[in-house]
Amino acid sequence: MGHGSSPWWGNYNPTNLMMQPEKIVQYIIDMKNAVIGNNKQKANLIVLGAVPRLLYLLQQETSSTELKTECAVVLGSLAMGTENNVKSLLDCHIIPALLQGLLSPDLKFIEACLRCLRTIFTSPVTPEELLYTDATVIPHLMALLSRSRYTQEYICQIFSHCCKGPDHQTILFNHGAVQNIAHLLTSVSYKVRMQALKCFSVLAFENPQVSMTLVNVLVDGELLPQIFVKMLQRDKPIEMQLTSAKCLTYMCRAGAIRTDDNCIVLKTLPCLVRMCSKERLLEERVEGAETLAYLIEPDVELQRIASITDHLIAMLADYFKYPSSVSAITDIKRLDHDLKHAHELRQAAFKLYASLGANDEDIRKKLILIILCRCLHSLSRSVQQLRTSFQDHAVWKPLMKVLQNAPDEILVVASSMLCNLLLEFSPSKEPILESGAVELLCGLTQSENPALRVNGIWALMNMAFQAEQKIKADILRSLSTEQLFRLLSDSDLNVLMKTLGLLRNLLSTRPHIDKIMSTHGKQIMQAVTLILEGEHNIEVKEQTLCILANIADGTTAKELIMTNDDILQKIKYYMGHSHVKLQLAAMFCISNLVWNEEEGSQERQDKLRDMGIVDILHKLSQSPDSNLCDKQYLM
């Protein structure tokens, strides 16, 4: 096909094609290959009038089965394009033609027609009623379910998309949908099992008749609810877990399963709460929250159970964080996706909040408290608010009260706000310190909840920044060196980083450095050594080297480095590291050790020269990096 020329099929009409039977199939195959995955070619083909011609060939008794099948495949490919493509196909009355094709004895042709019908019926522009216009269609589709796994997959998918409301449910139910589809839940094909499951979820929704029937259906000796419970186990695909949970939810709401049944309390509800966690995809979180809201809406006991399961209330607060940063998203499609789901996430969260607080006053109070804490936490990020409103209204007082005795999900938010109130410029810092905050925060660092450990150590880190010696001593005494070093080996990276930040803030100002190192020097040097030897990322090692640089700035503390050959060798190693951040941090250590104006500087310089550190400094002075080649490091 030359550039700019019309496709070859534009010049043919059906009658001419019929005179060349040996070539027609190849023409259609070439057409199929040309349009697969190419929306522009699909649109061109439709504009050129190919759809009526393909439908003509598909319906001709004289067309071979192979030709009819290939025509159905091309039409299916066209339907996979844009919504406008589907509208064009509908305008050409494609559905009656494909439904007629299902009467063929040939299985491959039937499968091609069903695949095309599936694609058309799952499009939002196709009216579902078109499936129900001819009363013979549904029973015929039921009969075709047994033909192959493809007929099972496509027909179940058509049913689940075209079952909208009680009238459709009744038609499908009366034609034996439950009995015909139930055994498909044990199919070897995952796609068949999944589509059958989706069918049951739409059939059972707000339908007591279907739900009561499902409860008593046996498949291979097992009742359907038991099969659904197996399908929502953690080792199953998320899509399967979520759809199974929807089936059980709808059956429960329809009165077929009791709300205190173990399959609801111990299986369905926890599964739906899991779907709300931030590890799940945005779409899954929306579906999980909305289904859970529907499940617990009328039942106070389920509301109470949900409110204390896996910190659900705190989880929902994360639903309001999307998109996290619009300006950071360069992909327009991704931005559209996130904005759409941001709206859906908020809507789902509000629905679930409404269900959680529908009946129980204690849950309402808990919800209000966490929402207030979230709001205040957001405001506490503003320097102006910290210096004005938060001071004028002594916000820290009720906050400290909440922190004394609250569930974890509220503690996480409240302690996050406390981190901000303890910043150096916050007027609330002093009264908070006087009200026993050090002991409270040290207690949080021992929590099993990583978020609370992070917030506890983060707040202590902020408290220690440019603090007086007394405050630093109080922190070390309340925290204990044993707990400090437990935190330095914490499995949570955020805890480790904030603990290093605390240590760095404690080891600032020479008299403070010397005082702390005189009492805790041995343990601190041991911890520093372990981290520098361990499998840690660049940021962790950089922060550790900065702590060493602070120690090297002490008057007496620097001797703990100079008398530790192992540490000196590590500093030397990091001066030659491939990562500039680590090189700079190591050079700061050396700079503080050899500063000329301090006593003993010559002896320290001599020792470092003997170790070969001067040679490394000379090499770095030739570096293209302006920070590395700074001459102040040369001895």
Image: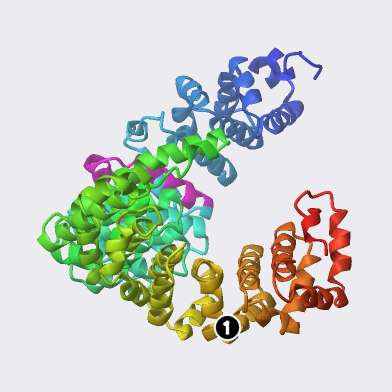
Task: Name the residue type under label 1.
Answer: Gly
Which portion, as a residue range, is magenta? 150-179
Expressed as whole percent of the image width and height from the top left, the position of residue 172 reads: 30, 46
Expressed as whole percent of the image width and height from the top left, the position of residue 263 reads: 27, 70
Q: Is residue 599 left or right of residue 104?
A: right
State the count of labels: 1
In magenta stretch: residue 216: no
Quarter of the view holding residue 330: top right
Around disc 1, counting alpha carbons within 10 Å, would you say few (fewer than 14), some (14 to 19), or many (20 or more)? some
Expressed as whole percent of the image width and height from the top left, the position of residue 149 reads: 52, 55
Q: Is residue 576 above or below residue 383?
A: below
Seen from the viewer's position, the closer of residues 114 and 101 is 114
Expressed as whole percent of the image width and height from the top left, the position of residue 205 reads: 25, 50
Give the SS element for disc 1.
helix
In magenta stretch: residue 161: yes
Q: Residue at x 23, y 55 (%)?
A: 395
Quarter of the view holding residue 475: bottom left
Query: Which residue is identified by label 1?
Result: 521
Q: Quadrant of the C terminus?
A: bottom right
